[in-house]
Amino acid sequence: MEKLSDPGLIQYIYDTVEKTAFYQLVGLQLQSIAKGEAVFTLQTDERHTNPASLIHGGIIMAMADAAMGNAIRSLGVMGVTVDCSTAFLAAAPVGSLLEARGRVLKQGKNMIFAEAYVYSGEQLVGHCKASFFNTGPLQY
């Protein structure tokens, strides 16, 4: 991981993550940020379950999207999700600590491509690839 050298950008990302209502509602926590990479965690509980009493796939997708989106923001730009494809590889049990690791694959002029892996412990539970539209530089 290449360390971010801009303390203003680092603070901006942590501040905006903390103020993002959806992240707070779900319980997403930013664990680390580096150039083109971000890691989020979520301690799951009953509110994150589906009718089968397993962690809802939407939680896995939301974590992946957050990790990818903030990996993009670590480059000093804002991207909005255009397309997202998620493979659910295993079920995550209630009470598990989930970790989403996002990274930028390629940054073009208008489009940015990223992927994320979501783990429950050592078990890979989801893999996501997405395309983002580059809306321009962050203002911080």
Image (tube, helix red, strand yellow):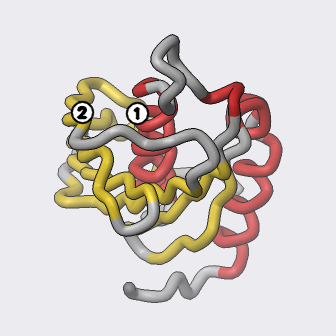
Secondary structure found at label 1:
helix
Q: Which residue is mark 2?
A: 86
Secondary structure found at label 2:
strand
Say whether disc 2 or disc 1 marks the residue closer to the N-terminus.
Answer: 1
Question: From this viewpoint, which residue is outermost toward the top?
Answer: 51
Write the residue at 73% across / 42% down. Answer: 27
Q: Identify the mark at residue 3; answer none if there is no mark.
A: none
Along the line of sight, which residue is nearer the eye, 84 or 5?
84
Q: Is residue 14 left or right of residue 135?
A: right
Say if 131 sits above or below 51 in the image: below
Q: Identify the mark at residue 61; answer none if there is no mark.
A: 1
Say if 81 sits above or below 104 in the image: above
Write the residue at 58% across / 40% down. Answer: 94
Mark 1 residue type: Met
Q: Position of residue 133 (x, y in %)?
A: 31, 33
Q: Marks 2 and 1: CB-CB under 8 Å?
A: yes
Write the residue at 69% across / 80% down. Answer: 7
Write the residue at 36% across / 30% down. Answer: 81
Mark 2 residue type: Thr
Q: Quadrant of the N terminus?
A: bottom left
Along the line of sight, which residue is nearer the eye, 86 or 45?
45
C-alpha distance separating marks 2 and 1: 7 Å
Q: Position of residue 61 (x, y in %)?
A: 40, 33
Say if 136 sits above or below 82 in the image: below
